[in-house]
Every structure is written in structure tokens, then in C-alpha cells.
Amino acid sequence: MPAQRSAAPVEEASPDALVIRRTMAEIAPIADKVTSYFYALLFVRHPEVRPMFPAAMDTQRDRLLKALLTAAEHIDNTPVLVDYLQNLGRGHRKYGTRPEHYPAVGECLIGALSKYAATVWTPETEAAWVRAYTTISQVMIDAAAVDELRAPAWWQAEVVTHDLRTSDVAVLTVRPDQPYPFLAGQYTSVETPWWPRVWRHYSFASAPRSDGLLTFHVKAVPAGWVSNALVHRARPGDVIRLGPPTGSMTVDHTTASGLLCLGGGTGIAPIKALVEDVAEHGDRRPVEVFYGARTDHDLYDIDTMLRLQQSHPWLSVRAIIDQQAHLQLPDAIREYGPWNEYDAYLSGPPGMIRRGVDALRNSGIPSDRIRHDSVEELVVVGH
Ligand SMILES: NC(=O)C1=CN([C@@H]2O[C@H](COP(=O)(O)OP(=O)(O)OC[C@H]3O[C@@H](n4cnc5c(N)ncnc54)[C@H](O)[C@@H]3O)[C@@H](O)[C@H]2O)C=CC1
């Protein structure tokens, strides 16, 4: 969820929201224990759902609690919550989630919360959680049901090209087995045949193409099962699975404002897609791309970006190399500008996004004109 949409202020919170936040505050320091206990309950009481989860549950654990925290945090902010939960509901189709699984999860969630938030757990607390969970699950179930009428739960996609650009970055092109509608700037989830049910997020590195092919930039990161498989193991002919497209870092074609784009490392992927999108719409809006990398060797896609710059006079691409410039991407934009007439797009490591958002706000861009993917989601992007 983009950072610019902030939670409802505490003073406006409903009684249920207050109760939920109190429970959350209580369990925050022991979140790991709560999550382990929740999954233990779920798998003991409902062993039939175990095969829907990955063999190793490490990242999955954090995901559940993050999703719950986000839902609880926004419980009063209905449009934001509904948007988030609809996406979550659609995204759960690829796991094989059915409506009947939701009550099982709810019962185990309440079991885990009541055990670990015992000091604040009363019949009112339980009632507030039951109401919240009923709302949350119904929005997810409804969104999945609507989605079922128009899209598959997942797509299979055959690797068509695999280009190792550096020792740890690969550019992959894949061909989905059915049409895959998406918007430039969005991302999807990817599962490889070598790590079943382990899904990771990757941004599309091209705007939608007439041949239907999709491109991803993948960096193999330490202990990153999916990223290492995609970079070092995947070959043309291998078949991966894709979830639905998601994300709101898309170009607003109703305005003519300039675009200020910051892409750090493989974060350049969706920025390239955005540039292609602007080019296809034929708008002559200024697009200023800052492409950050640690060394010039890490600028694995600079040739493509410079080629785009040559063909489009409205596009300017600047490479910012930490080691040469002695500064990182967010600092570099301060030296240019002014940026108050621009919409900003950030893509890259979470630290870059956080510092970039601060730098952009300080340079006069209002928060609602700053777009990026959710930093929480990025914790599991690209691993
Ligand atoms: N939609 C998105 O936001 C996307 C995000 N990513 C994420 O981008 C990252 C790319 O990783 P790498 O290529 O290894 O990038 P990296 O760690 O080498 O960083 C690239 C550049 O970002 C800037 N940067 C990095 N950390 C910073 C910090 N704490 N403060 C300020 N600036 C900082 C620096 O200029 C650096 O050269 C991954 O975490 C991946 O998950 C990748 C694709 C899309």
C-alpha cells in the first residue's frame, strides 16, 4: 500500500479499532511466538490446509502478521482497507484458498491472540476481533469470487530468454499461457518449479507488449531461494507460475505533469516500463530518470535506458554511482530540480524508498504525488 495513504488519526478511532490496537500493542513484542502458535493451531486442527503452504515457513510467518497489522491499522479507513483486502483476496486464489478456509483461520487467529494477549482479552475484545475478522474475510472472499469470473487463479509462463547481465542479475522474458493484462509500473508474484508454494514479487520491466511477453529483472540475493533459482537455474523452456498483477505505481495519463523517477539497482525495472508507457501514449511530458547503483558494473541496464533517451527528447537519464558521486540516489535529486511540478516514482531497496520519500517531500513534492510500492511488501520482494 503506498505510504501516502496514512492511517486514520488515533483520536477518530472507533471503539473496535481501539480494542484491536490495544491487542496489537500487547502482542507486538512477542509477534514471533503468536505467529508460530497460530500456525501450529491451524495445522493441528486443519491438517488439510498444510499442503497449501510452503515446506519452510520462514517468510510466510511474517507475512500473515504484516497483513493483519495493516488491516487492523486501517480498520476505520474503509476505502484503503477495502482496496488492500480485495487485492489480498484476489492474490489468495493462487494458493487454492477457498471460502471455507476463512473460518478455520479466524478461529486459530482468535485462539492465538487470546492466549498471548490474555491481559487485555475480554469478551468485548473477542467480539471486536470477530467483527473485524468477519469483515476482513468477507471482503477477501467477495473479491476472489468476482475475480474468478474474469481471470485465472494463476498463469503458467514459459521462460523464453534468460540473459545473465552480471554475476548476479538476470533479465528474463516469459510467455504466459493466457493473455496477461497489466499496467506499466505494476508487479506480480512468481513461483518457480524448484520451490513449490514459495512466491516472491517482481515488477514488470516492460510496458504491455503486442507479443504478450513479460520481462523481469532479477538479482540473486543471499538466502534468496526464488531469486537464486531464477538467476542461476532457470533456462529457456522452464515454466514458472505467475499470480495476478498488482500495485498502484502507474502513470496518471490525465495530467501532463513531469515524471521524476528514481530507480535503485533492479528497481530500474518498473521505471523502464513507465518510460515505455509514456512513450506509447505519445505525451511529451518531461521524464527525468535517476538510476542509482553501487558501482558502474551494477548499472546492468544503462544501455537500454540510454537508447530510450536517444529516441525520446523528453527523456533524461542520469546514472548516480554511489562510489563515484560519494552520495546515494535520494541525495542526488536535491542537486537538480525544482521538482514541484513533477509526480515522483520510486523503486528500489526499502531504505532508498524511505530516504527518497523524505528528500522528495523536502523538495516540495506533496505526498499524494509520490508513488511507490509498499515498503512492507518489499521486505519479501526479490528474495
Ligand atoms: N517496485 C519496486 O520498488 C522494486 C524494488 N526492488 C527492490 O530493489 C532492490 C534492488 O536491490 P539492489 O539492486 O541490490 O540495489 P542496491 O542495494 O545496490 O541499491 C541501489 C541503489 O539504491 C540506493 N540506495 C540503496 N540503499 C539506500 C539507502 N539505505 N538509502 C538511500 N539510498 C539507497 C543507492 O543509490 C544504491 O546504489 C531490492 O531490494 C528489490 O527488492 C526491485 C524491483 C522493483
Image (cartoon, rainbow, N blue to C red):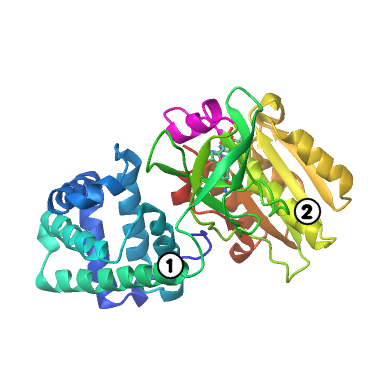
Left or right, 201 with respect to 16, comes to right
Q: Residues within 10 Å of mark 2 (few under 14, many from 20)?
A: many
Residue 291 in view, yes or no: yes
Query: Label 2 belongs to which residue?
Result: 287
Which residue occupies the foreground of this view, 232 or 33?
232
In what element is the residue under mark 2? strand
Left or right, 259 with respect to 74, comes to right
Residue 161 occupies quadrant = top right
Q: Tell me if residue 50 is in the magenta stretch.
A: no
In what element is the residue under mark 1? helix
Q: Tell me if residue 226 is in the magenta stretch.
A: yes
Q: Quadrant of ligand 1?
A: top right
Could you tell me the amino acid type at mark 1? Gln
Query: Label 1 belongs to which residue?
Result: 86
Could you say where residue 16 lies in the image, as x and y percent from the top left? 25, 74
Which residue occupies the foreground of this view, 173 or 231?
173
Determine whether 164 is above or below 84 in the image.
above
Residue 330 in view, yes or no: no
Tell me which label, 1 or 2, sits earlier in the chain: 1
Could you tell me the amino acid type at mark 2? Val
- Seen at 25% across and 59% down, the residue is 24
Marks 1/2: CA–CA distance: 32 Å
- Seen at 74% across and 46% down, the residue is 289
- Seen at 36% across and 74% down, the residue is 76
Could you say where residue 296 lies in the image, as x and y percent from the top left? 71, 26
Q: Residues within 10 Å of mark 1 (few under 14, many from 20)?
A: many
Q: Is mark 2 within 8 Å of ligand 1?
A: no
Where does the magenta region start and end?
A: 219-235
